Amino acid sequence: MLVTELIKKINFNDSCVNELVYANGTVILNIDLCMWKQNEYQDGDPELKEVILKFLNSTNYNWDSEKEKMRLIMIQLLMLHVKKVL
């Protein structure tokens, strides 16, 4: 999946970043994803879900968050240069 496809498919608004790690060309992003903002959400489903995104073969990334504790309004993953997302 391309990063641009990921951004179109998943609504990251109001999700919270638990951890961001960059090592050996891999970016690992652990977030609490707001499930209630997703198209597939149905009443009674959990509102939050811990999600781990792995971006392989990353040559660079740019983290730009103005909020404390890495709280997100929107994740700017388009600046991440990767070949493959797991």
Image (spheres, rainbow, N blue to C red):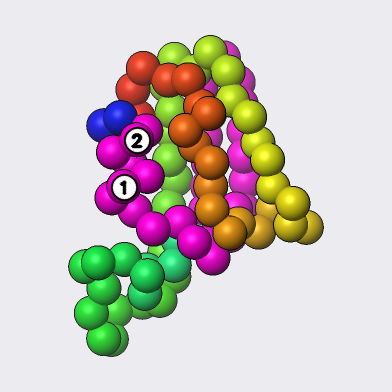
Residue 9 left/right relative to 7: left
Q: How crowded is mark 1: few (under 14 residues within 10 Å), some or many (20 or more)?
A: few
Above or below for 47 versus 24: below
Is there any visible trace of residue 69 in the rendered image? no
The image quarter containing residue 55 is top left
Is residue 27 located in the magenta-colored stretch of the structure? yes
**Residue that mark 1 sits on:** 8
- Tell me the magenta residue range: 3-31
The image quarter containing residue 36 is bottom left
Q: How crowded is mark 2: few (under 14 residues within 10 Å), some or many (20 or more)?
A: few
Mark 2, secondary structure of its residue: helix
The image quarter containing residue 37 is bottom left
Do callouts 2 and 1 mark residues in contact (Cβ within 8 Å)?
yes
Q: Looking at the rendered structure, which numbered label has been put on residue 61?
A: none
Which quadrant of the figure contains the N terminus?
Answer: top left
The structure residue drawn at horizontal position 54% and vertical position 41%, both measured from the top left corner, is 76
Give the amino acid at mark 2.
Thr
**Residue that mark 2 sits on:** 4
The structure residue drawn at horizontal position 37% and vertical position 44%, both measured from the top left corner, is 7
Residue 86: x percent and y percent?
33, 32
Residue 81: x percent and y percent?
48, 20
